[in-house]
Amino acid sequence: MSTDDQVLEEFTSKEYEHGWSVDFEADEAPMGLNEDIVKFISHKKNEPEWLLAWRLKSFRYWAQLEEPKWGNVHYPKIDYQALKYYSAPKKGGKVKSLDELDPEMIKTFERLGISLNEQKRLSGIAVDAVIDSVSVATTFKETLGKLGIIFCSFSEAVLEHPELIKKYLGSVVPAADNYYAALNSAVFSDGSFCYIPRGVRCPMELSTYFRINAANTGQFERTLIVAEDDSYVSYLEGCTAPMRDENQLHAAVVEIYAAKNAEVKYSTVQNWYPGNKEGVGGIYNFVTKRGICAGDHAKISWTQVETGSAVTWKYPSCILKGDYSIGEFYSVAVTNNYQQADTGTKMIHLGKHTKSRIVSKGISAGKSQNSYRGHVNISKRATHSRNFSQCDSLLMGNQCGAHTFPYIDVENSSSQIEHEATTSKIGEDQIFYCKQRGLDEESSVALIVNGFAKEVMNNLPMEFAVEAQKLLALTLEGSVG
Amino acid sequence: MDISVINSIQEQFNKNEATYLAASLTHRKSALDFVLLHDLPDRKDEEYKYTPVNRILKKNFDFEKIVTSNSTHLNFKDHFYKLKGNHLVFLNGTYLPAQSIILNDICCQTEVDSKQTFKDVFDALNVAFCKNSLKIEVNEHYRPQPFFIYYFYDSEQGQVFGNPNIQITAHSNTRIQILEKTISTGTHPVFINKKVGVHVKANAQVNITKIQNYKKHIFQVYNLEVNQDAQSTFNSNVYSFAGGLIRNNLSINQLGEHCESHMHGLYLITGHSHVDNHTSVNHTQPNSYSNELYKGILDENARAVFNGKIFVRPEAQKTNAFQSNQNINLSDSASIHTKPQLEIWADDVKCSHGCTVGQMDEEALFYLRARGIGKNQAKALILIAFSEQSLEYIPFEFVKEEIDTLIRKRLIG
C-alpha cells in the first residue's frame, strides 16, 4: 500500500495540479460569435471554400437551435457572445522541426508530463499537442508515415488530405446532430486527424493532449479517426486547464469510423479544472463522441476516466451497423465538491449478431451529482444481438447524489439484454476489515475505490492506468472522514 | 398543440356543466383550465414518450361522439363474486350506490372537492369530468370485509368516456383489501380515465389487486396515488392481459419511517395491445423498504413500456429499494421499452435495479423435451413458471386461480 500512501501524501497540499497558466503571446479573435468570426477562423486556417461553406451552414443551423435542457445538470446560462472562439499562441503554428518550437511551450508540456522531444521519449507514444485553438506539435510523424499512417493536426489534414476530410468529416456526427455539435462544426479550430490504412496495426499509442491556457476562450476541437479494413489503433486523449474563477466552455466532437474488421480503442482521462471547493469556476465539458462500426466484425471501445470539469455532459456512443460488430463502453466518473456529471453511452444496434457491453462506475462525494444516462437500442433488423450493462454507484457522504437513467428499447425476439445497477456506500464492515489489517482509513478507502473501479482501469493502456489511478485518489482526497 | 381534441374536451365540459353541482363547479373549472393549458401528452413528453395518448385517442376516440346515457341492460349482480364482501358498482365511470352491496357503513358517494389536487393532465381531466366520487374510509382498529369493485362499461349506444374517482383512507391499524375488475359490453370505443387516491395511515395495510383484461376498443389511463404514513404497508398487484391501451401510473409517497411497499405486475399481451406501467416510489424518511417486480411476455404486435422510478431523498437513510423488470419477447413484431430509473441523494442505502429482455431458455426447453414433453407444452410450462412468481402476493385464493386460468388459457391456447 506504500504507493497509495505516497499518492495521498503527494497531493495532500494541492487541490488541482495543473491549475497554472503561462502567458503566451496570443493571436486572438475578438469576443463574440457571428458569421464574421466563423469566416475569420476559416481564413486564419487557410481553409478551402467548401469547408467554410460547411462551417457557415452549421453556424446558421446552430443559430436557430435552443440549448438542450434535458440533462440532469444545472448551471447558469452560457453567454455565447462573451467568449473568444479563437486563441493561438503567436509563436506556435507551423514549425518544421521541434527545434523551432517556442521553448516556453515545450516547457509547458513538460510541466504537464508530456515530452514533445522524440529522442528523449522512452515509451513510444506519438503526441499531438493542442493549446487553446491550435495544434502546436505532433511527434513521431515520420515513423508513422512509413507505415502509411496519417497522424497530424486537423488543420494540416484539411490542407494536405482534403479528400479524406471531405469524405469523413461529419459522417458520424453530422453538423445538425445536436446543439454543441453544431456549434463545434461552425467554430472548431483544430484537433487531431488520424488515418490507419488497410491492414496496418498501429505500432504505438497515438495521443492528443488538450490544454486550455487563455482566459475567456472556449475550446472547440475536432478529432477524426478513420480505421480502414483490418486495421488497429489505440488512441489516448488527455486534457487540463488552468484554475480560473469563470467557467470556460469545452465543446469537442470526436468521430470514429471503423471499417470491416477494424478495431479502434479510444481512451480518455479527462481532468479539466473542476472548480474550487465552493464550486466557483471550472470547465463546462459538453462533448459529442461517436463511433460507427461501418463494416462487419468491426470493434469500437470507449474507455473513460472522468475526474475533472465542473459540468460534464457526454455520451460516447457506438453505432453498430456492420454485422457481428462490437461496441464497448467502460467508464469511471468521479465527482466531488460541486461537480456535476451526466454521462453514459448509446449503443445503437443495427447489424445482426452485434454485441455491446457497458460498464459504468460512478463515484460521488462532497455535494456533487453524478448521473448515468444510457440508451440501448436493438432495432428490428439487429437479430441475435446481445447487450450487457452494469452501472454501479458509490456514494461517499450524505450530500451527494447518484442517479441512473437507462433507456432500453428492443424490437426483435432473438436478442438478449441485461441491465443491472446498484447503489451503495462503502460499508463500515469493509473499512473495519481493512483497518484490522493495519491500513488507515484513507488507504482503506483508496483500496476499496480502486477495487470498485478496477474493471474499467484494466481497460486503460498502461501509460494511462497509472495516471488514472493517481487521479482517482486525488479527486476523492478529503471526502471521507 | 392539437386544437381539435382540446376544443372538443371544452365542448363536452360545456355540455355537462349544467349537471354538475354548484359547489364543485369552480374546482372543476380550474381543473379544466389545467387540461387546456397542458394539453394531452404526446411523444415529446418524456413521461409519455412511448405512449402518445393524444395520438392514440385522436385515432380511436372522438370526444364529440360521447354518449352519456346511464341505462343498460347489464345485470350487475350476475357478475359479482359469490363471496361475502362489499360489492361496489360503477357504470361508465359513475358510482351507483343503489346497485352496490355495502356491508358496513364505510362507503359513500360524494362530490369532488378542492381537496382533490391534480399534478397531471389526466388527474385534472378526471376532476373536471367525474360524475361523482366514491369515498371509502375505514376507522381505526377495524378490519372490514374485502371490497370488490366492478367497473361496467356499456358502449352499445355510442362512445363512452368514463371517469371513476375513488378516495380511500385507511386509518391506523386497519387492513383493506380491494379487487378491481372491468366488465364491458358494446363495440364503440371507451376511454377510461381512472383516478384513485389512497392514504394509508400509521400501521395500516392496503392491498389493491387489478385485473385488466379489456377488449381492444378500450383505452385506459389509470392514476393511482398512494400516501403512506409510518409503519404502513401498501401492496399493488396488477395483471394485464389485453386492451387497446393500458397505461398505469402508480405513484407511492412514503411519508413516514418503516414503510413497506410491494409492487407486482404481470403483462401477458398479444395482438396490438399496448401496456405501459409507470411506477414511482418516493422514499422521504429513513428505514423504509420497497420492492418491485414486473414481468412480461409479449407476442404478435404487442408493445410494452415499463418505467420504474425510485427516489431516495437525503433524509431517507437506511432505505432498501429493489426493482426488477423481466421480459420475454416471442415475436419480432413486438417491442419493449424499459427504463428502470434510480435517483438517490442519501448514502447509507441499498438500492438496486435490473432488467432483462430475452427469449425462452433453450436449455430448459431441451431439458423438458428430452423428458418426452411436446414442444408446445414445454414452452407453455416454462412461460407459466415465469409468470406465476407474480401471483404470490394476491390475498385472495380464488383470484389467484382466476388469473392462473387466464395465464394458462393464453399460453396453452
Image (tube, rainbow, N blue to C red):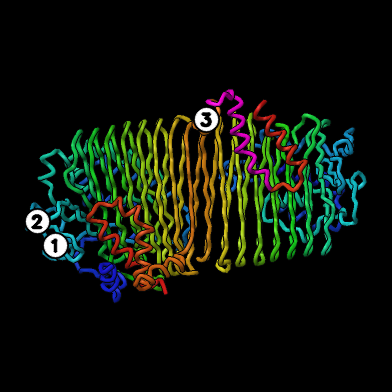
Query: Do marks 2 and 1 both belong to one polypeptide chain?
Result: yes
Query: Do marks 3 and 2 both belong to one polypeptide chain?
Result: no
The chain containing the residue under callout 3 comes to B
User: For this view, does A390 lie left or right of residue B73?
Assistant: left
What residue does disc 2 label?
A: A98
Q: Which residue is depicted at the point 18% across and 60% down? A: A114
Q: Residue furthest front?
A: B371
- For the N terminus of chain B, which image quadrant? top right
The quadrant holding residue B275 is: top right
What residue does disc 3 label?
A: B367
Q: Residue furthest bottom?
A: A13
User: For this view, does A343 lie left or right of residue A149?
Assistant: right
Mark 2 lies on a secondary structure that is helix
Q: Are marks 3 and 1 in contact (CB under 8 Å)?
A: no
Viewer-proximal residue among B88 and B390: B390
- Per the model, the C-alpha gap separating discs 2 and 1 is 9 Å
Q: Residue A358 in the image: x percent, y percent? A: 40, 47
Which mark is drawn over residue B323? none
Viewer-proximal residue among A156 and B351: B351
Report the amino acid beneath label 2. Leu
Q: Nearer the viewer, mark 3 or mark 2?
A: 3
The quadrant holding residue B246 is: top right
Mark 2 / mark 1, whichever is N-terminal: 2
Query: Do marks 3 and 1 both belong to one polypeptide chain?
Result: no
- Per the model, the C-alpha gap separating discs 3 and 2 is 69 Å
Viewer-proximal residue among B220 and B251: B251
- Position of residue A109 relative to residue A330, above or below, is below
- Per the model, the C-alpha gap separating discs 3 and 1 is 68 Å
Viewer-proximal residue among A354 and B146: B146
Q: Are marks 2 and 1 in contact (CB under 8 Å)?
A: yes
Q: Which residues are magenta?
A: B370-392
